[in-house]
Image (cartoon, grey):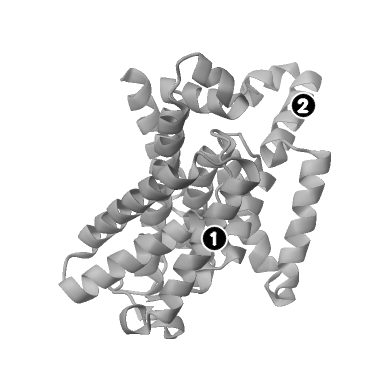
Amino acid sequence: MAGLLRRLGLCLVAYAAVAWVPLVTSEYHTHILVISLYYVILAVGWNLLAGYTGQFSLAHHTFAGIGAYTSALLVQRAGIPILAGVVAGAVVAAVVGYGLGSLCLRMRAIYLALATWAFAESVRLLVTVEYQITRGDLGLAAPLLFGTPRATPYYYLFLGLALVALLVAWQIVHSRIGAYLRAIRDDEEAAATMGVDTFKWKRFAFVVSAVFAAVAGAFQGHYIGLLSPTPMKFNEMATVIIMVITGGLRTFAGPALGAVFIELLSELLRRWGEIRMVLFALLVIAVVRLYPAGLVGLLRATGTRIGARLPALAPLLGTRRPAD
């Protein structure tokens, strides 16, 4: 309990440390930061599943869409409060994730990836063709959470959500459950031999990652104000994978760092259009080939070198490796 309270305190300090940013940036730049924080939540959730559990799902972005559409439809059609809609979106995503996990998680490697990709494409096509319900490519209007399209209030919301996602992920990774997940990733047969219910914990990670995505997607829908099937295309999933690998797959801080880095880089390269994805693909190849630990590993190695040359700074550049 003391450790949890300490980490809550650190989250509050981190929140306060960057709360000033919208006060000195334009609405456009604040919007970019909001989208970056949205991707932080997606990346942290997918890393929990793929990085720590070893289950390579290609449907993570679809759960963000499920959360967004569920919330928007319930708020529009049933007149429920937006926060209740977000909760409902998370519940629906958890139920769908539980069902999909039950069907697919006995598959491995490429078969799991293909099954989840097929599910993601099926949901996207369903959303596209069910015009009477989802409005298809014309877009479904979603009520704005704060009644304004200005990015500033949403920055504070998504900053809090991102810190909560990181805190929850930390609690899972550094618990007995986290040890089970890493054991499954490293050697599933050996984990089962030692008495770990591998299917149960894989499904647990699948559902948790689905809830992460659904909550982020629902709030993002009530920020943008218009939902369409476009963010449910594979490009979105590819972006999340690029963020996690660039930041550092199987590291704790890597997905958050990679999400912010790639989103900011994407904005800088916006005039390049779809060529950005080619450049990001080359970046991933370079990272995997030259520095598999990603940006986190690079920063850790740099801190180690500086600490070796300047011993007085070593305590400030602690390179204790997180659970992986």
Judge whether residue 272 can be spotted in this image. yes
Q: Position of residue 1 (x, y in %)?
A: 31, 20
On screen, 294 above or below 113? above
- Residue drawn 75% across and 71% down? 275
Amino acid type of disc 2? Ile
Mark 2 element type: helix
The C terminus - image quarter? top right
What is the distance, in whole Å, between disc 1 and disc 2 at their CAs? Answer: 47 Å
287 vs 159, left or right, is right
Q: Which residue is mark 2?
A: 306
- Say if residue 25 shows up in the picture: no
Q: Position of residue 48 (x, y in %)?
A: 51, 38
Instruction: Locate residue 27, reporting x and y percent.
Output: 48, 70
Q: Is residue 48 left or right of residue 241?
A: left
Furthest toward the top, the residue is 194
Q: Residue at x 27, y 73 (%)?
A: 147
Q: Which residue is mark 1?
A: 118
- Looking at the image, is mark 1 or mark 2 earlier in the sequence? 1
